[in-house]
Each structure stands twice: as structure tokens, then as C-alpha cells.
Amino acid sequence: MSELYGRKFKLTILLNPRKNIADQLLAEYNIPKTAPEIPAIVIEQNSLEQNALRVTFDVDYPGLQGWYYSEICIYNFNISTLMQVIDDGAAVSLEAGYINGNYGEIFNGYIFQSLFERENVTDYKLTLRCVDGQRLFSEEFTAFSLDKGRNNQVAHYNAIAAYSQMPIEIGNIPSQLRTTAMDRGVTVFTSPAKGLADLLKNYSIDKTNDGCFFTKKGVIKYFNMNDPLKEPPIVISPTGEGGLIGTPIQTKYGCNLTCLLNAQIELDIPRVQIKLDQSQVRAVKAAQGILLAPFDYDQTYQVIGVRHVGDTRGNEWYTYVTGINNQGAQTLMETTQERGL
């Protein structure tokens, strides 16, 4: 199937990533390393010939503030390398798409469990159960102190991420965070999630409670559900580059659809939009107690859930999308009640 469709993928496994972080710190201070370089395992397919191991994956990002699990299976892996992956904690990056089409990174996270089994008489399979998202941010730990007048709130914000057990990259700084000098010293001894939430609560200009944090690929972003969406929308059609498969189905808050694997469709901040072209959304039957969103006649939806599924030697190479109406996902019954119907 890869020969027919020109699929492209790259799986990178970085063994013991904490060791690499330590080596970077040693290099900054010109301290010689006492251990050899930690290798990275790379499996890739970037031509029409099937010259790579068979890899299957199921990458699932079901919501904006989720605990994201993904499974990556590698068949007939080298045994000695396999044991390294099982023994060491490892960071995983997966890129997928097409040689002459959409291609990009669809997962970047950590292995929390490795499973090895014999699937058939001749095939051995290594399953990497990987994790990314909110829990890595909310269940970590950070501890540091800042003196009175020494720093401002933006530095405080950066320090919470920098002093975490596994350093977190800051994607953006909330615009309502004050930048005045701190009027007293502060000691942080908590999780990064709680530390940042307390900081916004105490030092925000408007004391807003509408803000949320989104964590993905080791990057934390602050956002508000009223923030503008990403422009322009990604166009999905049956015949165009989007590769729509089947008919989108109406849901309570918008619609669900399936298309050819598209790395551009992702759960991110600003929120990604998709626009259906030359397609109709299939309505579902109304029933007592089931509220349905009215159709979006512009056929533009916010992406609030994404699942990428692929098999480098099989048929699956799809992206499943959960979308909501841009009008705020107001349900049909709520709409009719407002109109007095």
C-alpha cells in the first residue's frame, strides 16, 4: 500500500532523554562528559520502496485538556536495540504523511510502558505505550525561591517551568500578567500547574477565571476559549488535497469526519479550523433527550479532537476529526427555546 500511495513516515526514539538534558547542561559550563553519547533510534520511510520495518500507530488527542495516550507498534525489531528501549525511559517523535503531500510531526511524548510479544509464528512485535499532555504538566513538581523586588511576574512565570523536574517549554505569556516588580519574596513548592494557576490568580490584571492551560509536546500554552481561531481554515473535500473519506456525521455539538492522514489537522492553540468543501453533513435522527447542534451552513468547524491511525504495510492511513460549531456549539433545543418555539 505504501508503494501505491507514496506514504512517508519517520519514527525517532531518543533513549534516556534525561541524560541528554544533563549533557546539555554540562556543555553550557564546559564540563567534560564521562559517558558516551546516547544514541537515537530512527526508523523512516521516505521513498516509494518499502525499505523500512512495519510500523503501526494510533495517536489520540481527544480534548484540549487531556491525558493523551498513543500506541506505536514496531514489528521484527532488532533484539539488542529492543532491550534498550524496554530498559530505558525514552522520548518518542513520530512524523507521518505523504511524500508529495501533507507531512509533519503528529506525536512527541514519552514511553511509559513497553510490551514485547510474538504475534504470529514468525513476527515479533514491540508496542510502545506513550503519553503526552496535561498530566505531565499537572503531576510534575517544581521548587524554587525568588527574593523580594528581584524579579517580576513574567520571570516568575518562566521560573515555574524552568525549575520543573522535567523542564517545560513556555509557548506564550498571558497578556494580562502584570510586569511590575514583586512586592515580596516568594517560594514555590508545588506542581507547575498549580503554581501557574496561583500566579495568574494573584497577579493578573483583570483577575480572570476564564484562562486555561494546554500542554502538548512538552510545551505549555495559555489560552482563553474566547481567543481568535487559527486562520485560514484547512479545506477538506472528497477530491482535493484534504482527502475526505465518506460523509461527515452530525453530532451534538458539530460533526465528526474522516480524511486521509493530515498532520496539519492537530489539537493546538490557537485552535485549528477545518472547512468542508463539496460535501454535505449527514444528519442524525432526533430523539427525546438528545440535543443536536444546528447545521453550520458555512461548514467551518473548530478541531477539538484528533486521532491519527496508520499502518505502513496496511490500508489504514487516516485522520479522525471531532469538530464543533464555530458559533459556540449551541444545541438545537437551546436554540429553539430562545426563539420561543
Image (spheres, rainbow, N blue to C red):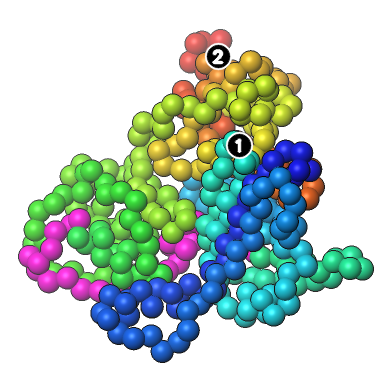
Q: Position of residue 215 (x, y in %)?
A: 44, 53
Looking at the rendering, the stretch of residues picked out in magenta corresponds to: 129-154
Which part of the image, by quadrant, shows the C terminus? top right
**10 Å crowding of disc 1: few (<14), some (14-19), many (20+):** few
Look at label 2 and name its amino acid. Answer: Tyr
Disc 2 secondary structure class:
loop
Give left or right: position of 24 versus 294. left
User: How far apart are labels 1 and 2 at the CA level?
Assistant: 32 Å
| Badge 1 or badge 2: first in the primary sequence | 1
Q: Tally the marks.
A: 2
Name the residue located 36 percent from the left edge and 43 percent from the top edge.
Answer: 223
Q: Nearer the viewer, residue 128 or 256?
A: 128
Name the residue located 18 percent from the left edge and 44 percent from the top edge.
Answer: 205
Q: Nearer the viewer, residue 91 or 132?
A: 91
Give left or right: position of 329 versus 126. left
In the image, residue 337 sits, relative to residue 151, either above or below, namely: above
Tell me, yes or no, if residue 327 can be seen here.
yes
User: Was residue 131 drawn as part of the magenta stretch in this picture?
Assistant: yes
Mark carried by residue 117: none
Q: Position of residue 154 (x, y in %)?
A: 20, 56
Tell me, yes or no, if residue 294 can be seen here.
no
Image marks 1 and 2: residues in contact by CB distance under 8 Å: no
User: Was residue 162 drawn as part of the magenta stretch in this picture?
Assistant: no
Name the residue located 61 percent from the left edge and 27 percent from the top edge.
Answer: 241
